[in-house]
């Protein structure tokens, strides 16, 4: 009898554990992104896709999807799918869109495809690098708003990129030199010129900073070499001196024996 009760208890326990395991692996609202760039040249084409899985799990049965971007010449294509089959598809123009979603007539996946061109830079910053919003997706339910996706990218022109690369190179040279005040002052001026859209001047100043840092490093290496050589010469002279003393002493000993 006790063994039967024990077996039943084990079965019940296993069922509870199984239900908890299923609950733990249940699907949940999630979003994935494809094609989001880290950086783009101004005017280049950008194409990204966001996929929202289980859009009504753990949230309201009715909510509004809003999208915002700083791209130019924009096209949004919002596709609703159920079990992989298309239920609805709508295309929007402009930098903003709004799409109502309802659990009764919408699917289990929402795909947002966005295309546009990278915008011009309105404010250059060296650190952190200037960014723009590729896409911001927000879930709106009543008075509640939740941004669940925010993608940004660095944008640049040919001139600004060359200036940034020159500044980066100068910074590495300064680090290798262990720091140099003249080079650091030039680099600071280069960054200031960069942030004021004066890229040619920024590049020239950065190149001067790199040269100053390299010269400082070479000077340090030369000084170190001279110190090592001087130390070696002193050691040699000491050895010669000791040798001479020993030699003269031995000569004196030999003379005294005579």
Image (tube, rainbow, N blue to C red):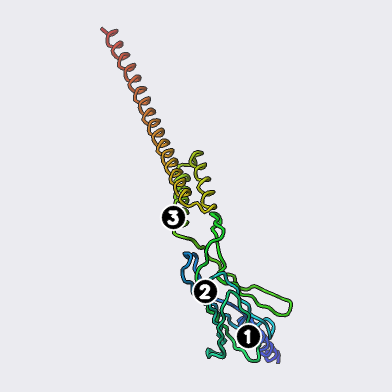
Q: Residue placed farthest to the right in the image?
A: 143
What numbered label is drawn on residue 44?
Answer: none
Above or below for 77 versus 188: below
Q: Give the alpha-carbon distance from disc 3 to disc 1, as whole Å.
A: 60 Å
Q: Give the alpha-carbon distance from disc 1 to disc 2, as whole Å.
A: 52 Å
- Tell me which numbered mark, 3 or 1, is placed earlier along the sequence: 1
- Tell me which numbered mark, 1 or 2, is placed earlier along the sequence: 1
Q: Give the alpha-carbon distance from disc 3 to disc 2, as whole Å.
A: 27 Å
Quadrant of the snapshot with the N terminus: bottom right
Give the image location of residue 222, x and y in percent: 38, 34
Q: Are marks 1 and 2 in contact (CB under 8 Å)?
A: no
What numbered label is drawn on residue 18?
Answer: 1
At a point 40% along the width and 30% down the height, the residue shown is 227
Q: Looking at the rendering, which quadrant does residue 16 occupy? A: bottom right
At a point 46% along the width and 53% down the height, the residue shown is 163
Q: Which residue is mark 2?
A: 73
Give the secondary structure at mark 1.
Answer: helix
94 or 4, which lies in front?
Answer: 94
Above or below for 12 versus 129: below
Q: Which residue is mark 3?
A: 162
At a point 25% along the width and 7% down the height, the residue shown is 258
Above or below for 53 versus 152: below
Give the image location of residue 33, x and y in percent: 53, 75
């Amino acid at each position: 009898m006790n063994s039967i009760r024990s077996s039943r208890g084990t079965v019940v326990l296993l069922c509870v554990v199984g239900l908890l395991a299923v609950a733990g692996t249940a699907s949940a609202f999630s979003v994935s992104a494809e094609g989001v760039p880290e950086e783009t040249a101004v005017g280049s084409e950008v194409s990204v896709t966001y996929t929202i899985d289980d859009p009504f799990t753990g949230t309201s049965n009715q909510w509004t999807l809003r999208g915002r971007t700083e791209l130019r010449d924009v096209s949004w294509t919002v596709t609703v799918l159920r079990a992989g089959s298309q239920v609805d598809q709508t295309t929007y123009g402009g930098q903003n869109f709004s799409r109502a979603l309802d659990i009764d007539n919408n699917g289990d996946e929402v795909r947002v495809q966005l295309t546009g061109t990278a915008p011009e830079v309105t404010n250059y910053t060296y650190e952190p690098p200037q960014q723009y919003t590729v896409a911001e997706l927000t879930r709106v339910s009543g008075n509640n708003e939740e941004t669940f996706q925010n993608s940004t990218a660095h944008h640049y022109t040919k001139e600004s990129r060359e200036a940034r690369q020159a500044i980066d190179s100068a910074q590495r040279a300064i680090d290798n030199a262990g720091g140099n005040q003249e080079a650091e002052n030039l680099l600071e001026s280069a960054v200031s010129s960069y942030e004021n859209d004066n890229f040619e001047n920024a590049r020239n100043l950065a190149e001067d900073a790199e040269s100053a840092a390299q010269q400082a490093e070479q000077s340090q290496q030369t000084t170190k070499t001279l110190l090592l050589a001087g130390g070696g010469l002193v050691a040699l002279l000491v050895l010669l001196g000791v040798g001479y003393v020993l030699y003269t002493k031995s000569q004196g000993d030999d003379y005294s024996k005579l």
